[in-house]
Image (tube, grey):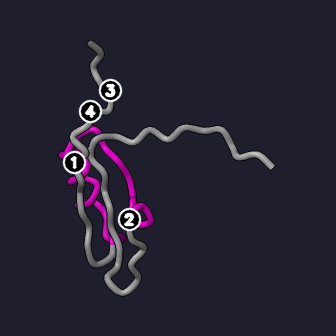
């Protein structure tokens, strides 16, 4: 059996969320990624399904790296 061949594009700002009493930990708490901090904040503000906590992580890596 072979694995499916697909690519997931991770953007600069990562949103994690979960419940204190049901911790997934690490990537199990990953929800979505965004190009801008504003998009990530808006996403969190528009939803009530994120449990007890949420966090936005800035990877510092642009979605489209610039070549030299």
Residue to which mark 2 is pinned: 26
Residue to which mark 4 is pinned: 62
Above or below: residue 21 compared with residue 23: below
**Label 3 vs 1, first from the N-terminus:** 1
Above or below: residue 62 compared with residue 13: above
How many marks can you see? Answer: 4
Magenta-drawn segment:
26-50
Category of crowding for the residue at label 1, using alpha-carbon neighbours closer than 10 angstroms: few (below 14), some (14–19), many (at least 20): some
**Label 1 vs 2, first from the N-terminus:** 2
| Image spot of residue 10 (x, y percent) | 39, 42
| Image spot of residue 66 (x, y percent) | 27, 19
Residue to which mark 1 is pinned: 58
**Label 2 vs 3, first from the N-terminus:** 2
> Which residue is at 44% across, 38% downward?
9
Q: What element carries label 3?
A: loop
Q: How far apart are marks 4 and 3 (CA)?
A: 5 Å
Image quadrant assignment for residue 4: top right
**Would residue 1 be found to the left or right of residue 25 on screen?**
right
> Which residue is at 35% across, 73% downward?
18
Q: Does the magenta stretch include residue 60?
A: no
Q: Distance between the residues labelled 2 and 3?
A: 24 Å
Q: How far apart are marks 4 and 1 (CA)?
A: 10 Å
Which image quadrant: the C terminus?
top left
Residue at the outermost top position = 68
| Image spot of residue 29 (x, y percent) | 39, 66
Residue to which mark 3 is pinned: 64
Q: How far apart are marks 1 and 2 (CA)?
A: 15 Å
**Dot 4 and dot 3 residues touching (CB under 8 Å):** yes
Q: How far apart are marks 2 and 4 (CA)?
A: 21 Å
Category of crowding for the residue at label 3, using alpha-carbon neighbours closer than 10 angstroms: few (below 14), some (14–19), many (at least 20): few
> Which residue is at 39% across, 78% downward?
23
Q: What element carries label 4?
A: loop
């Amino acid at each position: 059996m072979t694995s499916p061949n697909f690519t997931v594009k991770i953007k600069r700002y990562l949103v994690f969320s979960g419940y204190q009493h049901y911790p997934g930990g690490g990537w199990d708490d990953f929800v979505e990624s965004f190009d801008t901090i504003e998009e990530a904040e808006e996403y969190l503000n528009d939803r009530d399904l994120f449990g007890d906590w949420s966090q936005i992580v800035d990877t510092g890596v642009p979605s489209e790296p610039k070549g030299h």
